[in-house]
Amino acid sequence: MSSASGAPVPLRSLVGHSEAVAAETPLEEVHRRFAETRRDFLAVLAGPELVGVCARRSIAMLLGARFGFALYARRPVREHLLADPLRLSESSPLPEVLAAIAGRSDELFFDDVVLVDPVGAFIGFIFVHALVRLQTDLMLRNIAALEASRRDIADKNRALEADLAMAREVQLAMLPAVGGAAGPLDRWRGHAYYAPASGVGGDFFQLLRISETAAGLLICDVMGHGVRSALVTALVRAFAENLRAEALDPGALLTHLNQDLMGVLRQTGRLLFVTAAYLVIDTAAGTLRYGQAGHPTGFLRRAAGTVELLPAEGEVPGPALGLIAGFPYAAGTTPIAAGDWAVVFTDGIFEVMNADGEEWGRDRLRAELGRSEVPPGEELLRSAVASAARFAATGTFEDDVCLAALEFAAGV
């Protein structure tokens, strides 16, 4: 038998006494034996065999009754045994022993427990208080172990939180600088809003400077969020940096990005995918090229304030990255002019729900981006995020939120 902690607890060591009388012993002699030993219970044996248990209280009541001594003093004790004493084997598991004690009625709870060996031979009596003390000791040890485990978990959680905080700082530091043109001759300008739902996120955007007159904007949303998603964003970012030769062609860039990502994900054996959208503004040619992979279609806000969908063949012209090997992604083209700017985003901004279960939706986002009283740029992106947050039942976002814009900057 062992304790909950695995340490052996021999029941023999808990035996308080082994007082016994023969089964044919007269009650008068048994009564004297109780007085001599000051025990409350005696085992009744027939040779080595345990016949049963007799109790001081029962014998005293029997002999003390009117004419009781005259009637019963010479009767053998085997005729006056307890009806159902608790008998336990020394091989009984500790939980079973403690459960048997706890399950006794109140009037029998403090009766001594009979301990026998595996073949049923009498070993002795265990006082209930010894078992209660053992149970209390085990509980205290378990509490101490749980408290030590709690402290260990708390220490590890603090270390994990510190690591996540550092990972968040690194992830934010890796985001491209936006808010102005990249150089004195550049004719494009980037804007962005990014807020991960947890310490680190699965959304990210990347600004690729192609030339003084051309730039690319990539936005991605990795399935789920947290550390695993953040690691995948780092992979996609690295792959995109190595694809600058295809940066002018959204279809080619997404095709090669999917190929590189599939090569890594195939080795993990896990289902993992990334939605993405990529656009290129070429101010010299006056064109915008756009492609997407399972991602929400972005918007193009014209200088006049109208908002339209970015060129794409339907809502999902290509599957998410990491799902279909060798898929050929395509791109659409539209003319643009100074003052026009394209906005791409992840679904965390428009999938928030109000108290009635209504989604904020892309139509509201489109309307927010067309507001004439807010100047285009980061201020307008923040205004749209604030409007979505006010709509949400909780006033917060449960998913990562990322919006990024690329502007054909006039007069730069």
Image (spheres, grey):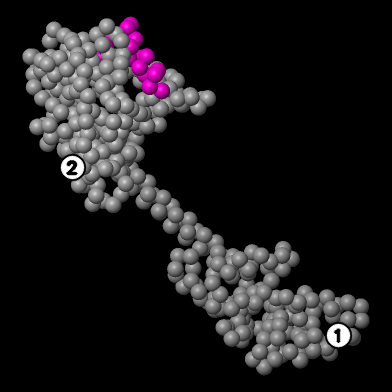
Residue 297's image quarter? top left
Mark in the foreground, 1 or 2: 2
Q: CA distance from mark 1 to mark 2?
A: 97 Å
Residue at 76% from the left image edge and 91% from the top image edge: 24
First to last magenta residue range: 361-377
Kind of residue sitting beneath label 2: Asp
Q: Position of residue 81 (x, y in %)?
A: 76, 81
Asked if residue 2 shows in the view, the reply is: yes
Residue 115's image quarter? bottom right
- The residue under label 1 is 72
Element at badge 1? helix
Q: Position of residue 19 (x, y in %)?
A: 66, 83
Q: Is residue 95 above or below residue 167?
A: below
Residue at 31% from the left image edge and 14% from the top image edge: 307
- The residue under label 2 is 260
Q: Position of residue 182 (x, y in %)?
A: 12, 19
Element at badge 2? helix
Q: Position of residue 45 (x, y in %)?
A: 69, 88
Q: Is residue 185 left or right of residue 363?
A: left
Residue at 75% from the left image edge and 78% from the top image edge: 82
Q: How many marks?
A: 2
Quadrant showing the C terminus: top left
